[in-house]
Each structure stands twice: as C-alpha cells, then as structure tokens.
Amino acid sequence: MHPAAEHSPLGKSSEYIATYSPQLLFPIPRTAKWAELGVTAETLPWQGVDYWNCFELSWLLPSGKPVVAIGEFAIPADSPNIIESKSFKLYLNSLNQTVFASSGELQACLEKDLSAAAGKPVGVKVRSLAEVEAQGVVPLPGQCIDTLDVAISNYQQPQPELLRCSADQVVEETLHSHLLKSNCPVTGQPDWGSVVVEYKGRALDPASLLTYLISFRQHADFHEQCVERIYLDLKNLLQPEYLTVYARYVRRGGLDINPYRSTRAISPQNQRLVRQ
C-alpha cells in the first residue's frame, strides 16, 4: 500500500457532505511509487496526462434548479500528486447543493481546487450531456490481441520477463487488449481496463504482451502506476524510437481514470470506450 493512502478516506465509512468542501480532496505524492520504478521527478522517462471523467457532476443554479453535466479533468503526468479517487468523489459530491452562477464559474472553481491538490495546473471541461452523447463511443486503435491462444500460470505480480521480441527488425504498430485487470491497493477491489501500446521499435511478440498484461490480474496498485510499470517494461525491452502506453479504465463511483504515458509530447483525444 502507498504509505499515504492509509490516511485517505478510501476503504472507510464517509459522511455525505453536499455543500462545497475543497478540504475533502486528498493528494497522494507520486514520489514513493516512482521510486519503486527507479525514477524521480527529475528523471521521468515519459510525458503524458491522466484523464479523469466524472459522470455524476451536479450543482445548483441561483434559482435553485439543479444542473447535471459530465466533467473532464486532465492532470499532468508529472504533477507532484495524484488525487485519491474516493476523496475526489466526495469533493465532487460536495458540489451537489452548491450554487454556481454558470458552468464557467464552476469550471474555474474546479480548476483552482484540483490544481492545488495535484500541485500543477489541471485542465477542466464541463461538458453537456448532449455533447458527450453526440461523441458516442469509439473502438481502440490497432490489433486486438485478446483472441491469441496463450497459457497463463501467473496472476499475482507483473512479470516483465514474459515479454519478448519476435524479430530484430524495426516495426511500427499498435496493439491493444481489454484483459487488463488489477486490484486497488487499499480496498482490494478490482479495477478493469483496456490498454493500448503504440510503438516503433523491435517487433514485440503479441502473445508475450498478452501474458504479461494478464500477470497484473491480482497485482495491487493504482491505475497510474500500473500504466507506468507497463510503459517502463516495454521501453526497456524494445528500446523504441517512440512508445505510447495508455489505459482506459472502467469507472467506479462515477469516475473513470485514463493514464497516458509517452516518449514524446502527445495530445490524446479523451474518447469513451464501450465499457466506459
């Protein structure tokens, strides 16, 4: 467990507070998990963003009439802190009986509070239901590897030694799987995700990637750290010209978390999958 997580509201009974309470946000420093991977804030081998989507965003107009919307939050991957997910949910709930004159006023409030918790500027969009409905859901890019016939014997810990290259030639391809699963390091509850690997480098054996991803099945870690571990293991093996790894996780508590990590600057589109 992350040393700071035991002091968070995660896994504990919590009072429902329905009026604005920014103190509910609980930041968790990234440094401890980065240290496990052998990196520091000064030596991060990736760029990226964590997209959070909130499907239970509501507040009151000055007339007292409630509004519902969908919130999109972009937290820089190099921010000093992640925001513990239950505290994020409790904070968003505290807006339910809070008056904002406009969605712009709400957005400014969210940007201020979330940036303070993350330690870097957080991008916020308050999106209408009609806008998100029109966008619809999208398929993942590239080749799905889930139909490959593989034998699995390990589910407890990620095993990078399972990864292998199928040839020495350089290829450029995109692979994806919907079989990523890990567990919350505090509650032990399952986290389900779909993962995408885009790279140019030594040819990765798809079956080895699938068995590697499945080895996370009983592993306990936060979403962001799982993606960072996958990214580093692949980077070490492939020595790529470029590499992007991202995961789209199924929502819990009205929030989904979608970490993106890349060797280069990226501006990913935050688009929903069928399980989101």
Image (tube, rainbow, N blue to C red):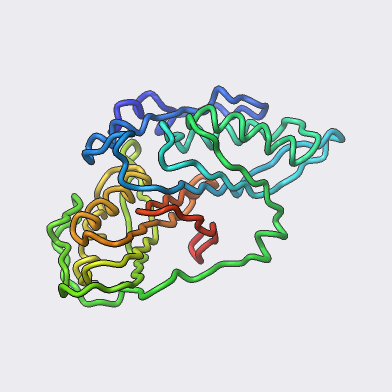
Q: With respect to residue 111, does 67 lie above or below?
A: below
Rendering coords of residue 272 (x, y %): 54, 61
Question: Residue drawn at (33%, 60%), measured in percent from left and top?
Answer: 242
Taking 83 as reference, is 3 left or right? left
Question: Residue drawn at (23%, 41%), measured in percent from left and top?
Answer: 37
Question: Residue drawn at (64%, 65%), measured in percent from left and top?
Answer: 135
Q: Quadrant of residue 80?
A: top left
Rendering coords of residue 170 (x, y %): 24, 72
Specify the farthest residue to the front: 241
Q: Is residue 188 visible in the rendered structure shown here?
A: no
Q: Quadrant of residue 224?
A: top left
Taking 149 as reference, is 250 left or right? right
Specify the farthest residue to the right: 63
Towards the viewer: 41 or 185: 41
Rendering coords of residue 106 (x, y %): 71, 36
Towards the viewer: 65 or 136: 136
Question: Residue drawn at (81%, 34%), measured in percent from left and top?
Answer: 101
Rendering coords of residue 57 (x, y %): 65, 43
Image quadrant in which the N terminus is located:
top left
Taking 177 as reference, is 21 left or right? right
Label total for image: 0
Q: With respect to residue 148, does 202 lie above or below?
A: above
Q: Is residue 243 visible in the rendered structure shown here?
A: yes
